[in-house]
Image (spheres, helix red, strand yellow):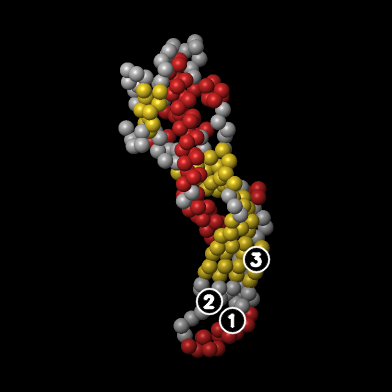
Amino acid sequence: MKENAQLKKCPVTSIIGIILLVAALCIQFIPNNKTTASPSLSDYSSVNAICELATLKSFYHNVAIYEVQPETSNNFLDDVILLPLKNLVNAGYKKLWVEYSGIVEIGIDASQIQIANADQNGIVDAFIPDAKVLNVYADEKTVSKPVTETGMFTTINGEDLSKAFALAQSAMRQEVENDQILLLKAKNNAKLLMEQYIINTGKKIGVEYTVNWMDHPI
């Protein structure tokens, strides 16, 4: 049985999942003046929160199409006798398509971020990895009722629908992984937030930090 699966997409619209607000960042990451503990540039909880703030979401309007052609055989008698009958009623043929909104989340792996201690001039070496696809999912509220076509003696089941969705999700992931502009936007968003965090941490202890971004891990 020959199976064919396709994915049609409208142009992608990308937005920042959470707007970069410096004021909110300062409130969240700078310790209260009453706190006696020394601020730490490498505090994982703060770094993880920054990465969450820097996440981008890319939205797609998808039409997932799944198609199966009638089965053929290598048997001469089947091809001569049965195949014409199958073709007459289109037995084995099935096709379905579903529309829905797909969402791809792009961000930074917080565990790979590195921040060195500041030198005597207040320069802080920092490294942020490239952004990557963190999650791919469908907005269940937007899934339309499947539209189907079948030949005689042929039905469409849940497995067929699952295959259509799997193809659509895989195609979305692949497209974003190949979109260097979108991935760079996510990385730069994380760098802006991280830099503000480092500078504000320095202000807390009366030191002016300058961030030196490293191209490779420290």
Q: Position of residue 148 (x, y in %)?
A: 65, 66
Residue 110 in sight from this viewpoint: yes
Q: Judging from the image, what secondary structure is the residue with disc 2 in?
A: loop
Q: Which residue type carries mark 2? A: Glu
Count residues near mark 3 (Cα–Cα under 10 Å), then give few for <14, some for 14-19, many for 20+.
Answer: some
Residue 39 in sight from this viewpoint: no
Which labelled disc corresponds to residue 148?
Answer: 3
Tell me, yes or no, whether the two marked residues, 3 and 2, touch with CB atoms within 8 Å. no
In the depicted view, which residue is nearer to us: 100 or 200? 200
Total numbered labels: 3
Residue 214 relative to residue 24: left or right: left
Q: Position of residue 17 (x, y in %)?
A: 57, 38
Marked residue nearer the N-terminal end (3 or 2): 2
State whether residue 107 is above or below residue 196: below
Q: CA distance from mark 3 to mark 1?
A: 19 Å
Q: CA distance from mark 3 to mark 2?
A: 18 Å
Q: Judging from the image, what secondary structure is the residue with disc 3 in?
A: strand
Q: Which residue type carries mark 3? A: Thr
Quadrant of res 7:
bottom right
State whether residue 112 is above or below residue 82: above
Count residues near mark 2 (Cα–Cα under 10 Å), then give few for <14, some for 14-19, many for 20+.
Answer: some
Residue 124 relative to residue 141: left or right: left
Residue plotted at (50% across, 40% down): 185
Marked residue nearer the N-terminal end (2 or 1): 2
Q: Judging from the image, what secondary structure is the residue with disc 1 in?
A: helix
Disc 2 target residue: 71
Tell me, yes or no, whether the two marked residues, 3 and 1, touch with CB atoms within 8 Å. no
Disc 1 target residue: 86
Q: CA distance from mark 2 to mark 1?
A: 9 Å
